[in-house]
Image (tube, helix red, strand yellow):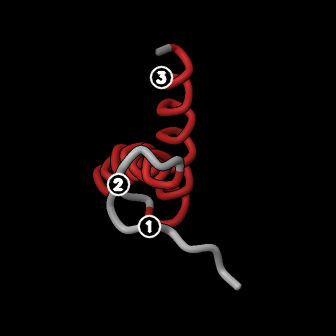
Amino acid sequence: MARQIKFAATHFSIAFSMSYAVNQNVALSTFFGIAEPIAFALGRDTKSGGHRGVPLVPAA
């Protein structure tokens, strides 16, 4: 659990700071900061085979 919190905090802080550096908007940067760890977690679960949806085929 501590590892997941660390990953989420790291991804939030990086996404927030990069977004704020680009657009200087706290509300939009907070949105990106919250959305990025969620997308990371979903992508990590999909890649690791946690879901049985569309099979991923390696590129040629």
Nearest to the observer: residue 8 or residue 33: 8
Q: Label 3, on which residue?
A: 5
Q: Amino acid at mark 2?
A: Arg
Instruction: Quarter of the image for the C terminus: give it.
Output: bottom right
Task: Name the front one of labels 1 and 3.
Answer: 1
Q: Decide: is 1 above or below 42.
A: above
Callout 1 amino acid:
Pro
Q: Are marks 2 and 1 in contact (CB under 8 Å)?
A: no
**Label 2 neighbour load within 10 Å: few <14, some 14-19, many 20+:** few
Q: Residues within 10 Å of mark 1 (few under 14, many from 20)?
A: few
Measure how far apart labels 1 and 3 are at the Cα level. 29 Å
Residue 52, disc: 2
User: Does dot 3 land on a helix, a strand or a loop?
Assistant: helix
Mark 3 crowd level (few <14, some 14–19, many ≥20, 10 Å Cα): few
Residue displayed at 35% across by 44% down: 34
Q: Residue furthest right?
A: 60
> Residue under circle 1?
55
Q: CA distance from mark 2 to mark 1?
A: 7 Å
Q: Residue at x 32, y 57 (%)?
A: 28
